[in-house]
Image (spheres, grey):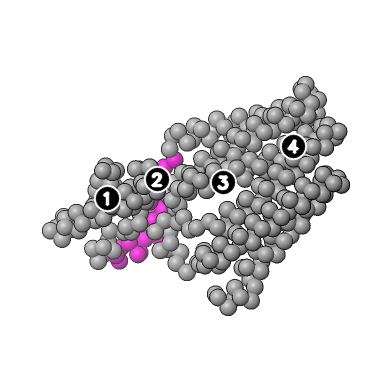
Amino acid sequence: MNTHIHRLLDDAFEGVETTAESRELKEEVRTNLMARSAELEASGLTSASAAQQAIDELGPIEDLLGTSGRSEAMSMAELHARNKVRPQPGFVVRTTLLSVGAAVATTLAVLAGFDVLSGGSAAVLGLGLAAAAMLGFVTADSLRQETSTNYPMPTARAVGYGLATFGVLASAASFAAFAADTGRVVLAIVGGVLLLAALGLFSWLGATQTNRHKQWVRTTTAGSGNRFERDEDAAARYGIYSGVIWVAGIGVGIALSILFAWWWSLVVLGVCIVASMLLLATMLFGSKAKANN
């Protein structure tokens, strides 16, 4: 049994006049919320997050009681304050420590790159990868947190964003290590491959992202949003097309780097970026998109 439901339900009914009708409605809602929170917990959410999402999906109590005039009159700021979610202390501490650690590692990597510290390209690469790993974790951890306007992102997708962030930063570390020792061409090849893979993953994750807005946000912003938010099939198609472009780009980039020179991976990177931008523009603003909208 999810005990968080009882506290949240009491908070939701705070200020509502106690009548036979409101008591009956409260118990009916409690039963529905318990069932919904059980479904959300089964999908991987914690009991606290499941209870909060279930109560958010319920919408304003005034609507259920047929007294929604006051709720509809509330401004966006008032609704935000009413649904405010405070950051968890553990998350704040983790983010602060890891961000400081990443800043220190990056600073030391720069010093090693300019031979102020010993270690050369190995130190640059190692410290750069450490900073990339810390910032990648911060990215995933941040997306897993509930905010006042958004539900927490599913763990697997949040980890995907964290890996993509790590890939971009790790590629920068590889290129920096190559700059410190241009004889190690393999570092440039690895950097190019990591960058292609990370950008491809970012494109796919962004295109296939579903709406995480809470009910009160969706209600106040009804009718807004881009084509991908209104048409999930279009977002799925864009994700598939982007995946094909980047997978093919990674393969071609690796082959050209091995057969000819490492900088061919940068050429392939540019082609993939241009192709992705053209695909995005076509999907959002093409004639078919206009017809659907």
Relative vertical location of residue 228 with respect to residue 189 in this rendering, above or below? below
Check disc 2 and report the residue beneath it: 45
For the question of whether residue 271 can be seen, the reply is yes
Give the quarter of the figure containing the C terminus: bottom right
Q: Amino acid at mark 4?
A: Ser
Relative vertical location of residue 183 with respect to residue 250 in this rendering, above or below? above
For the question of whether residue 52 can be seen, the reply is no
Q: Identify the image quadrant of residue 162.
A: top right
Relative vertical location of residue 63 with respect to residue 147 in this rendering, above or below? below
Residue 146, given in percent of the width and then of the height, sits at 44, 46
Q: For this rendering, which residue is in front, 147 or 255?
A: 255
Q: Secondary structure at mark 4?
A: helix
**What range is drawn magenta here?**
68-87
Check disc 3 and report the residue beneath it: 160
Which residue reaches farthest left? 20
For marks 2 and 3, give the CA distance: 17 Å
Give the quarter of the figure containing the N terminus: top left
Check disc 1 and report the residue beneath it: 34
Q: Earlier in the sequence, mark 1 or mark 4?
A: 1
Q: Amino acid at mark 1?
A: Met
Residue contact at pointers 3 and 4, CB within 8 angstroms: no
Q: Which mark is residue 174?
A: 4
Q: Earlier in the sequence, mark 3 or mark 4?
A: 3
For marks 1 and 4, give the CA distance: 50 Å
What residue is at 31 percent from the left and 48 percent from the top?
A: 38
Question: Would you call the spot at circle 3 few (<14 residues within 10 Å), some (14-19), or many (20 or more)?
Answer: some
For marks 2 and 1, give the CA distance: 14 Å
